[in-house]
Amino acid sequence: MPGPRVVPFYGDNDLPERVDVVVIGGGIIGVSTALELAEQGIRVALCEKGQIGHEQSSRNWGWVRISRRDPREIALMAEALKIWQTLDSRIAADTGYTQSGIVFACHDDQQVEKYQQWLQWVKEFPVSSTMLDEGQFRQKFPAANMTVRGALYTPEDGRAEPQKVAPAIAEAARRNGAYILTECAVRGIETSAGRVSSVITERGEIACQSVVLAGGAWSSLFTARHDLRLPQLKVINSVLRTAPLSEGPTETLWCQGFALRKRQDGGYTVASGHENIADIVPDSFRYARDFLPALRNDWRSLRFRVGGRFIDEARLDRHWQMDRASPFEYCRVLDPRPSYAMADGAFRQLQQHLPSFRQAKIAQYWAGCIDVVPDAVPVISAVDSKPGFYIATGFSGHGFGIGPAAGRLMADLVLGRQPIVDPHAFRFSRFSDGSKIEVFSGV
Ligand SMILES: Cc1cc2nc3c(=O)[nH]c(=O)nc-3n(C[C@H](O)[C@H](O)[C@H](O)COP(=O)(O)OP(=O)(O)OC[C@H]3O[C@@H](n4cnc5c(N)ncnc54)[C@H](O)[C@@H]3O)c2cc1C
């Protein structure tokens, strides 16, 4: 696999006959949910079609941030920041988490104004986000060769190592009694008397009372098989990492042309947050109306492309039989080809603005398929029409940082206990009950 090197995880051999909850998907959301449930003594089986953390959860930039979040996510992200602080000791592992602060540079006054407004949303939370003026920005990045109008700085934000986190949490879930099954695609759900009664996997059936779908970019296809409409699309972001570099900032930095984060190995993960590829596929037409408001807001960051993916996805069977191989078995890992032009473009901008990177050597490129929903707010919810079925997906490019708290919230909903935050904004039904889909354009 040309993607980043993920810490290996060896799945269990034996399929349990019966558990309480089956979790579909071994990304950060699935493993965090499994850990939360297993810690409560719930019998859990997590089924992953490929390997733990090989899709988005290992390909992301590793930013753990509350800054710039949609207000609907802030309370959950504040909980996530608390969880990250003790996660390593809780799971007895090194995820590389460190509270290193994140800076979003502003290149015009309009941006400064927007961030100043955004600060109102975090007032009641224990974070000290603040606006830096140009002088304060210079103190943080003395070598920076750029003019800024100001910057949003959140010292409580952090970073962690995406290639380590999902396998480490999965291992902890297993120590707490969860079955972790890799190369074990779930083909679908069976119901009995209107309730979830089992899942059919490629390795056999597992009886259960509840199913949590944490299938990342595959979730919409899975729900379509069960006649549930989940508007979800994919965009591709290209990333590179450098070899270790002795001089460079410890804070994570976002600028107009590049975004960078220091890695535990001493190198940097670099990409552009302003350039993504959106392949035109049949879902682009299927969900076009749902995504119109988002498109109006964010079209500048998207480069539309017509290519082979249209044919590949048009050929996908959306109503497969449970006794035949499902589409999930034909693609164990979504591994899109990176755009070298986009990643190199970000790297050139970085070298221009932070001269210490002129010595940096590029060590690797990769890309990831970001799953997005129309309002860019995740679904963490029960499915009202299918008792026992839950969905945690649609994290829209920022699910890594919030992942541990999303797992906690999902477990709360499955267990019927007091939710860690109000889950209303995350309900699945908002896409079908006539609710107005609001896109946050405040940053
Ligand atoms: C390039 C890039 C940069 C990003 N940067 C950041 C960042 O800095 N900070 C941040 O917070 N977020 C970031 N994100 C977003 C973040 O990575 C995702 O939101 C998060 O990883 C989503 O986790 P997940 O568990 O929902 O999905 P995934 O990690 O994609 O996992 C879903 C898993 O489900 C499995 N699966 C699907 N269907 C089935 C099935 N039927 N049976 C069994 N298994 C199945 C898949 O194989 C996959 O492993 C970034 C994403 C990308 C791609």
Image (cartoon, rainbow, N blue to C red):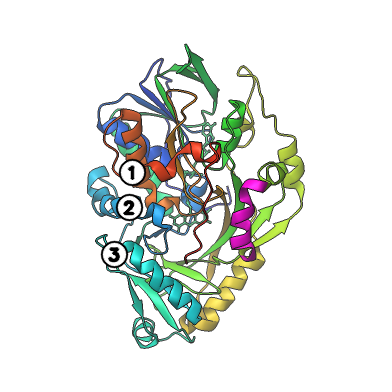
Q: Quadrant of residue 151?
A: bottom left
Residue numbers of the magenta segment: 289-300
Q: Is residue 295 magenta?
A: yes
**Dot 1 alpha-carbon crowd within 10 angstroms: few under 14, some 14 to 19, many 20 or more:** few
Residue at figure coordinates x 53%, y 74% from the top left: 256
Please state the horizontal and vertical placement of residue 180, each as a whole percent of the image.
40, 30
Residue found farthest to the top:
193
Q: Earlier in the sequence, mark 3 or mark 2?
A: 2
**Label 1, label 3: how far apart the Cα atoms are:** 18 Å
Q: Relative to 236, is 411 above or below?
A: above
Instruction: Give the percent coordinates (x, y) of residue 198.
Output: 46, 18
Between 17 and 227, the one lying in front of the other is 227
Q: Are marks 1 and 2 in contact (CB under 8 Å)?
A: yes
| Other residues around mark 2 within 10 Å, as few (<14) / some (14–19) / many (≥20) | some
The CA distance from mark 1 to mark 2 is 9 Å
What's the amino acid at mark 1? Asp
Q: Which of marks 2 and 1 precedes in the sequence?
A: 2
Q: Can you tell which mark lies on residue 75?
A: 2
Q: Residue 419 versus residue 40: which sits nearer the camera?
A: 419
Classify residue 77 as left or right of residue 396.
left
* Residue 321 among magenta residues: no
Q: Which residue is mark 1?
A: 422
**Callouts 1 and 3 close, C-beta under 8 Å:** no
SS at badge 2: helix
Q: Earlier in the sequence, mark 1 or mark 3?
A: 3
Is the CB of the residue bearing disc 3 within 8 angstroms of ligand 1?
no
347 vs 318: above or below: below
SS type, badge 3: loop
Picture coordinates of residue 424, whole percent (x, y): 39, 42
Res 378 seen here: yes
- 105 left or right of 123? right
Label at residue 123: 3
